[in-house]
Amino acid sequence: MHKVYFDHSATTPVDQKVLEAMLPYFSDFFGNASSVHSFGQEAMKAIDQARNEAAKFLNCAPEEIIFTSGATEADNLAIMGIVTSNKEQVTRIKPHVMTTLFEHPAVLEVVKHLEKIGVIEASYVKPDEFGLIHVEDIEKEIKENTVLISVMYVNNEIGIVQPIKEIGKMIQEIKKLRNKEIEGNENKICPLYFHTDAVQATLFCEMDVEKLGVDLLSISGHKIYGPKGVGILYVKKGTAVKPIQYGGHHEFGLRPGTLNTPLIFGMGKALELVKTRDNKELKNLRDYLWSELQKNIPNIKLNGSLEKRAFNNLNFTVNGVEGEAMLLGLDLAGIAVSTGSACSSGSLEPSHVLMAIGLSHEKAHGSLRITLGYENTKEEVDEFIKTLKPLVEKFRNMAPKNEK
């Protein structure tokens, strides 16, 4: 059976060039990068090369790159690190953190936890029906005690690209005014920082942190044809972040633990290869898929804007059919898709992302997420359509008349 993989937002295969670059650091150059002898220095050379590659990719200084075990840790470090560092500066009231209702759980659950235990107060900005966050909705929620605003760059389920550059510009203007007030009055006004989870944006969007106006940015290796278990948190110089775990002085004192040389080197190689990817062809394939879906599957609806979405993403609702049933039917035919984010696929609850843009429980449960990769072909799209069409007809015929 020929297998088709249409779930690249969950993870991507490791690029062969990345794999080849990593292999020597599992065995031949196995030293601890913190050791001063030649074995350690060989490993540190690889770390430095990867750090420089990441810094070039993000247009920042190498010392602003913090390697982590993945984007979840990077998001946790960004949020908890900012809150811990700045809590003492907001002496009269709790620090305020703002995020959106459809963030990845690596952001949303951290904010909710800190709010629940009374460490912060929080605001959750709602997207519009097309999945877009509006700058003015962010601006009106900013308070005197707001220390952090976190907005994901590209939503992991519906692929909508958020106006991070415009949000960043607005926040920079507020920071300028706030910085003037801070001078000579440090205990009254707290600093304000901007974070974005850019995991799903790395392959498709502008990633120059200066142009984006962000103070912190998270990315992940396994979403960009690199290895699992490695990520990066960009921390702009002067950003007040404290570590959230202790045990050493690695990564400029922010992330203790022995550096994972093979994975870090692999991430550097994956970032180097991003500029070689053909996004035009990927978008054309995505558009062809959507066109064929509309021709062959009646009564379907795209979730979120088509224009302002990642080039590889389609998230749509098939009315009258459970998403889980379609997923399982497709899987039996050798085609891998998703009904939402991979991180919540074991949950019976409807997608919080789809609920946030106004879908009912029933519509949210009838969704599929297709995320294409650079290795996918038109023939695979045709195979997918050929497989999905009779499945939908079968399940609709089985459903009660009022659910079709």
Image: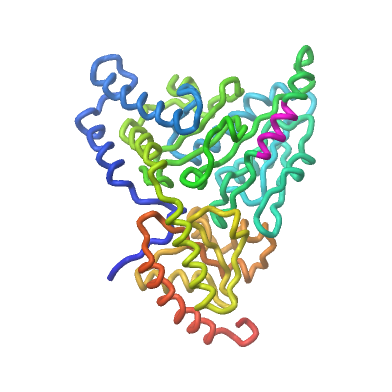
Query: In the picture provided, is 144 more to the left or to the right than 221?
Result: right
- Percent from the top left, x then y, of residue 14? 33, 47
150 in the magenta segment = no
- Percent from the top left, x then y, of residue 395? 50, 81
| Residue 307 drawn above or below residue 298 | above
Q: Which residues are magenta?
A: 166-175
x 45%, y 39%: residue: 70
**Residue most toward the left?**
28
Quarter of the rendering containing residue 333:
bottom left
How many dots with numbers?
A: 0
x 39%, y 51%: residue: 12
Q: Quadrant of the C terminus?
A: bottom right
Quarter of the rendering containing residue 23:
top left
**Residue most toward the top?**
184
Depth order, front residue of 368/287: 287
Depth order, front residue of 112/157: 157
- Percent from the top left, x then y, of residue 239? 60, 23
Query: In the picture provided, is 56 more to the left or to the right than 264?
Result: right
x 62%, y 32%: residue: 213
Q: Quadrant of the N terminus?
A: bottom left
Q: Secondary structure of the magenta portion, mostly?
A: helix
Query: In the picture provided, is 369 more to the left or to the right than 162?
Result: left
The colour style of the image is: rainbow
| Residue 401 drawn above or below residue 160 | below
- Percent from the top left, x then y, of residue 107? 59, 43
